[in-house]
């Protein structure tokens, strides 16, 4: 309960994953950089009522956790991608105004030389 409360709250500086074996196992999924799907297994049998109720309460609290997954990307690759996007955007801007010549598909051969 403490881990989920700390994750849902968002203001906690320390998440006590080690307080529970379950939250320790789920550490990378609960508060990490992932999209997570939780499946709660419950039983209709009356002798499993307490376990089912506990599972449903845990799942109900866990669904309030909001992860912010992002693509793991090398900073240099990210910078290159941003530069390429900026170059493409600027090319489109210039082409829209007609200020930039079209790039030739292949270099033209040099003109023949006459003595």
Image (tube, helix red, strand yellow):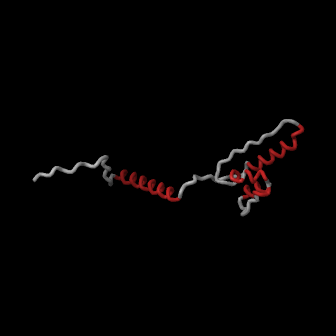
Q: Which residue is the extreme one toward the right? A: 47
Quadrant of the rendered image containing residue 20: bottom right
Q: Which of the 4 image quadrants contains residue 39?
A: top right
Q: How many marks?
A: 0
For residue 95, side relative to residue 56 (left or right): left
Q: Quadrant of the N terminus?
A: bottom right
Q: Using residue 76 as the reference point, say whether residue 49 is left or right of it.
A: right
Residue drawn at x 36%, y 51% as measured from the top left: 95
Q: Is residue 82 above or below residue 44?
A: below
Position of residue 55 relative to residue 1, above or below, is: above
Residue 36, horizontal then vertical, whole percent = 68, 47
Q: Nearer the viewer, residue 50 or 64?
A: 50
Q: Position of residue 44 (x, y in %)?
A: 84, 36
Percent of width and height locating residue 91:
38, 53
Residue at the outermost bottom position? 13
Report the side of 110 relative to 90 (left or right): left
Q: Which residue shows up at 72% across the image and 51% down it?
A: 26
Q: Is residue 42 above or below residue 32?
A: above
- Residue 64 rendering spot, x and y as whole percentages: 73, 50
In the rendered image, the residue lying farthest to the top is 44
Identify whether 18 is placed above or below 105: below
Whether residue 19 sits left or right of residue 92 in the image: it is: right
């Amino acid at each position: 309960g403490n881990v989920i409360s700390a994750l849902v709250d968002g203001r906690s500086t320390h998440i006590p994953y080690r307080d529970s074996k379950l939250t320790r196992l789920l550490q990378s999924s609960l508060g990490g950089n992932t999209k997570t799907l939780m499946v709660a297994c419950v039983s209709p049998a009356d002798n499993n009522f307490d376990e089912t109720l506990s599972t449903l309460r845990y799942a109900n609290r866990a669904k309030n956790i909001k992860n912010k997954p992002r693509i793991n990307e090398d900073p240099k690759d990210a910078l290159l991608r941003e530069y390429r996007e900026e170059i493409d955007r600027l090319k489109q801007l210039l082409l829209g105004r007609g200020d930039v010549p079209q790039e030739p598909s292949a270099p033209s051969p040099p003109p023949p030389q006459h003595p």
